[in-house]
Image: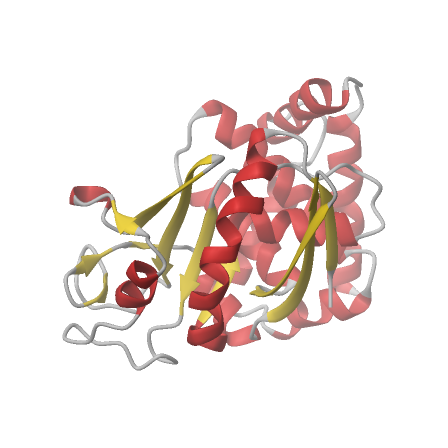
């Protein structure tokens, strides 16, 4: 079980500190039917690993919804009423899957996403009157089941603790890698997501327990896509992906060497999968 302790400093940390107390009751009610994905899950696993790299802050929270596990249909209303009880409101329109809660630290954003194929409609439907987006790799994360995260936020002498279900480490790698491989992203997001995916691969490579599920499920399309992406994107330091990680190291760490490090991670990752 990963444990993440954050000393609140910047605006993103303050939003989590103020917003999560309102989201925790919703997650408690949904149980294993709601999994934290995206930046917060990546931050938790990278912080809990032994790779020695700093965590990246995140301003919002992405939640993957298991429609089948929660028995959601096009007629049911379960998730949205829970959010509204806590003061969250949908942005509406094409962003109706995004919910906002006004806090003393600003607007706390929560995105609700489903797995590809979870809904037969396009765009996919989460439940009655709520269209959403599909998150590549989420089906694998749901298959792997959530992992409990103990999160502690400390701000001005006050500590707030949360117990949250996040995706497994190997699932976090698959989701980030498939996202980077299949979706066109803005340049800054592409740099961040590419770097996150490599860091998550490096974290997986520290323990066979995180590699074994990828080997076991190697025939799944999402797992295959993730593995092929990392093996094909970091053949040398001059590839576009390696240069993105190099840029991330320069921007976030103030040091060179990110591209070479990413290449070495990809090589070790491939050896462990073959082993």
Rendering quarter of residue 185: top left
Q: Is residue 58 visible?
A: no
> Which of the pair 275/63 is nearer the observer?
63
- Identify which residue is drawn at 42% across, 55% down: 136
Residue nearest the observer in this picture, 81 or 208: 81
Q: Is residue 18 left or right of residue 268?
A: left
Question: Measured along the vertical axis of the image, is residue 38 above or below residue 71?
Answer: above
Q: Residue at x 33, y 60 (%)?
A: 83
Q: Quadrant of the N terminus?
A: bottom right
Give me the residue at 16% from left, 68% from top.
Answer: 128
Q: Position of residue 202 (x, y in %)?
A: 76, 48
Q: Nearer the viewer, residue 36 or 266?
A: 36
Residue 242 coordinates in the image, percent (x, y):
66, 29
**Res. 143 visible in picture:** yes
Residue 113 location (% of width, % of height): 36, 57
- Could you tell me residue 89's position as x and y percent? 27, 50
Q: Quadrant of residue 238?
A: top right
- Quadrant containing the C terminus in the rendered view: bottom right
Q: Examine the rendered structure and indicate whether residue 70 appears above or below residue 176.
A: below
The image quarter in which residue 56 lies: top right
């Amino acid at each position: 079980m990963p444990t993440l302790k954050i000393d609140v400093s910047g605006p993103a940390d303050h939003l989590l500190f103020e917003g999560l107390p309102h989201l925790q009751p919703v997650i408690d009610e949904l149980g294993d039917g709601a999994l934290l994905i995206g930046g917060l899950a990546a931050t938790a696993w990278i912080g809990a690993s032994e790779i020695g790299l700093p965590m990246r802050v995140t301003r919002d929270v992405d939640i993957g919804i298991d429609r089948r596990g929660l028995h959601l249909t096009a007629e049911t209303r379960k998730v949205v009423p829970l959010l509204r009880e806590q003061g969250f409101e949908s942005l509406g329109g094409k962003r109706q899957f995004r919910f906002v809660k006004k806090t003393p630290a600003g607007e706390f954003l929560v995105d609700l996403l489903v797995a590809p194929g979870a809904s037969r409609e396009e765009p996919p439907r989460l439940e009655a009157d709520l269209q959403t987006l599909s998150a590549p790799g989420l089906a694998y994360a749901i298959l792997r089941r959530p992992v409990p995260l103990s999160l502690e936020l400390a701000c001005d002498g006050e500590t707030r603790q949360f117990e949250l279900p996040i995706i497994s480490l190997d699932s976090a790698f698959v989701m980030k890698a498939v996202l980077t491989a299949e979706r066109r992203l803005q340049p800054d997001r592409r740099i961040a997501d590419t770097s996150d995916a490599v860091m998550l691969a490096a974290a997986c490579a520290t323990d066979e327990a995180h590699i074994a599920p990828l080997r076991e499920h190697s025939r799944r399309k999402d797992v295959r896509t993730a593995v092929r992406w990392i093996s094909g994107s970091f053949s040398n330091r001059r590839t576009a992906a390696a240069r993105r990680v190099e840029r991330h190291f320069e921007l976030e760490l103030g040091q060179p060497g990110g591209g070479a490090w990413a290449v070495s991670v990809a090589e070790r990752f491939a050896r462990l999968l073959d082993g």
